[in-house]
Amino acid sequence: ISSEMGSVTTPLLAVVGQPVRGQDAKVVADMWQAAYGKAPKATVVFFEGNGEFITEESPAGLDRAIDQFLTGKPVEGRK
């Protein structure tokens, strides 16, 4: 899919749970940025300290991020 991301022209929000910290977190972040960064209207946001279940672990933060994305504001994850 990442090879075709450059052709995605609709706004795209990728919400990533990032349970690891430190250098491993940078590797994970770089991987997601490389995959989705090719889409011209992609926004990648990270929820540090979260695993795969952001809807359960950070529901208010996820709601805020989606609202920010849909209203054109800068999107904040969780640090």
Image (spheres, grey):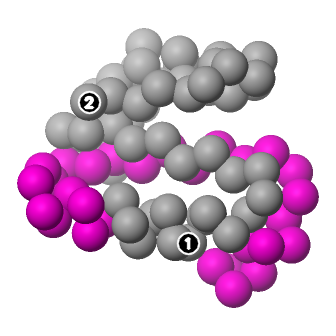
Q: At numbered mark 2, what does the secondary structure look like: helix, strand or loop?
A: loop
**Residue occupying the point 61% across, 63% down:** 37
In the picture, the quarter occupied by the C terminus is: top left
Q: Which mark is residue 79?
A: 2
**Residue occupying the point 27% across, 49% down:** 18
Q: Which mark is residue 35?
A: 1
Q: Quadrant of residue 68?
A: top right
Horizontal relation, residue 43 to residue 12: left or right: left
| Whole-percent x, y for residue 15 in the image | 50, 44
Q: Quadrant of residue 30?
A: bottom left
**Residue occupying the point 68% across, 69% down:** 38
11 inside magenta stretch: yes
| Whole-percent x, y for residue 39 in the image | 74, 63
In this orientation, does residue 2 appear? Answer: yes
**Residue occupying the point 41% across, 71% down:** 31
CA gap, disc 2 to disc 1? 21 Å
